Image (cartoon, rainbow, N blue to C red):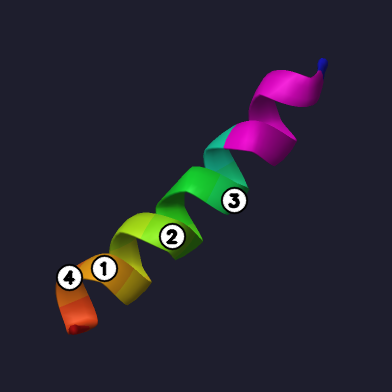
Amino acid sequence: MAEMLFKSIVEQVVSAGFSR
């Protein structure tokens, strides 16, 4: 159930990392 939340956080982190 927390997989969706985890994926959302991971996506944000990856987006921030790629933005750098």
- Residue range in magenta is 2-6
Q: Amino acid at mark 4?
A: Phe
Where disc 2 sits, the SS reads helix
Q: Residues within 10 Å of mark 1 (few under 14, many from 20)?
A: few
Query: What is the CA distance from the residue labelled 4 to the residue labelled 2?
Result: 9 Å
**Total label count?**
4
The quarter of the picture where the C terminus appears is bottom left
Which of the pair 5/19 is nearer the observer? 19
- Outermost residue to the bottom: 20
Residue identifier under label 3: 9
Vertical relation: 16 (above or below) 1:
below
Residue 17's disc is: 1
Vertical relation: 2 (above or below) 8:
above
Task: Residue 18: give x, y in percent of width and height.
Answer: 17, 70
Residue 18's disc is: 4
Task: Residue 8: give x, y in percent of width and height.
Answer: 59, 48
Query: What is the CA distance from the residue labelled 3 to the residue labelled 1?
Result: 12 Å
Tag 2 near tag 1, CB within 8 Å: yes
Which one is earlier in the sequence, the residue at label 3 or at label 1? 3
Residue 13's disc is: 2
